[in-house]
Image (cartoon, helix red, strand yellow):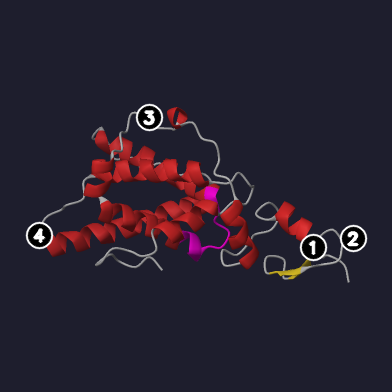
Amino acid sequence: MKCQLCEVRRPRRYCPGVRGEICAPCCGAEREVTIACPLDCEYLRDARLHEKPPEVDPDKFPNPDVQVTESFLRRNEQLLTFAAATLFGASQQNPDVIDIDVREALGALIRTYRTLESGLIYESRPNNPLAAFVQQKFQQALQEFRQQMAQNTGITTIRDTDVLGVLVFLERLELSNNNGRRRSRAFIDFLRGFFPSQPSGAPSVL
């Protein structure tokens, strides 16, 4: 029996991404490159423990004029948790969604909320259908979240400027966690681990 990918070496493990037996070198080389690895794959999870974070220069982050301070994040913790959980939930609804799709969705959402700051109403839509899917799910969930918050408090408590700040923060997290592989889902995995649940009272996106 030979590895399903290289057809040379003996297989050493079952790969749920290709649904067949593969060798360890192919697993390491093709993981999240040609193989769409399920997030719960034991070999992927072990590899995550040894991955080095990408070298990102914070001075080169997009939207540098948007300041995201620790006090801002504390003040908007519920909104941040909701936004992260929503992005993760949308990615799980379509297994083809990878980190770059989420990044494009975040970019489009940020452009949209920038126009709202200027008093215009213009929704930027990505050409990438997977990114557009994530963006649509986020906007739908945010509208429900706003309505629920308004019902609970009697006033609209979510400002567009706060949404913008949270989106920019998540965009920076994506850039800091994407492992650079063509089918990277390291950021999506990060969202699952760092923001494991939605805030109380938030509408479900699944």
**Mark 4, residue position:** 154
The answer to the question of whether label 2 and label 1 lie on touching residues, with beta carbons closer than 8 A, is no
Magenta residue span: 90-99
Residue 97 magenta: yes
Q: How far is the residue under mark 4 from the one under mark 3?
A: 34 Å
Earlier-in-chain disc, 4 versus 3: 3
Residue 103 screen position, x and y as percent: 48, 45
The answer to the question of whether label 1 and label 3 lie on touching residues, with beta carbons closer than 8 A, is no
**Mark 3, residue position:** 64
Q: Nearer the viewer, residue 50 or 122?
A: 50
**Mark 1, residue position:** 23
Q: Amino acid at mark 2?
A: Val
Q: Nearer the viewer, mark 4 or mark 1?
A: 1
Q: Nearer the viewer, mark 1 or mark 3?
A: 1
Residue 177 screen position, x and y as percent: 51, 46
**Mark 2, residue position:** 8
Q: Split into 4 quadrants, where in the image is the N terminus? A: bottom right
**Side of 30 relative to 88 (left or right):** right
**Side of 91 relative to 68 (left or right):** right
